[in-house]
Image (cartoon, rainbow, N blue to C red):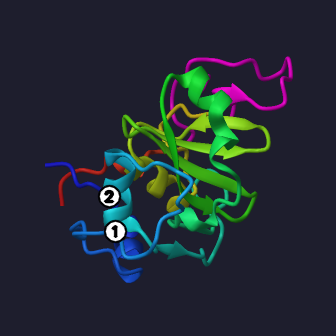
Amino acid sequence: MKKRFPDEVEKILRAGGWTGTPSEQINFELPAHFEIFPAAENVLKEFAGFYYKPDPITGIEFARSEFSIDPRHFEYPADSFEEEEESLGKKLYPIGKIFDYPIDILIADDGVPYSLSEYGLCQDGDTFDDTLISCILGIRPCPNYTLYPVFDRQSSPDYPPVARCEWLLDKPLLPDPREEGPS
């Protein structure tokens, strides 16, 4: 049976207080100007309050990211990503923040994670677990991930809106630790 997280990620999550079992409720007041939906609520019940500051920052494919799972870090009004929601045909909810860049971590109503920066919106894998693995290990959230946005905030011809991140590479740069065998 495939493990949910690579060993290093699970160790870091557990050291940060993650138990592997969702809480009954979210233990802090959520931003009132966003309407929460089940996918966001499920992530927050399991990971709310988790904070990670990498040491060392060197990751497998890029730097590991300092991040927090806390929607209170999102500092913009509720209509901040209306265009992205319309483009995707999905509702989005702020889940946390990657502090290094800064990038907001969002989740769609179908459970797909996204990152939102000044450059646009990128899909960060298929599940929120992919986002956690990416930030903690410094690895692409899916084997052929690239940083081209799904929705371009700057309307640059270099970054046209697309249905999801472009899959430009046909194989990972390094072995993907998510492909570990059973333990």
- Which residue is identified by label 1? 10
Per the picture, the main secondary structure of the magenta-coloured stretch is: loop
Between 6 and 77, the one nearer to me in the picture: 77
Q: Find residue 12 and report its horizontal and vertical position in percent.
A: 42, 74
Residue 165 colored in magenta in the image: yes
Between 103 and 38, the one nearer to me in the picture: 38
CB within 8 Å, label 2 to label 1: yes
Residue 169 visible here: no
Residue placed furthest toward the left? 1
Q: In this view, does 69 lie above or below 154?
A: below
Q: Find residue 77 and report its horizontal and vertical position in percent.
A: 68, 51
Circle 1: residue type: Glu
- Which residue is identified by label 2? 5
Is 129 positioned to the left or the right of 106 in the image? left
Q: Distance between the residues labelled 2 and 1?
A: 6 Å
Quarter of image, res 115: top right
User: Element at badge 1?
Assistant: helix
Q: Find residue 67 and report its horizontal and vertical position in percent.
A: 59, 66
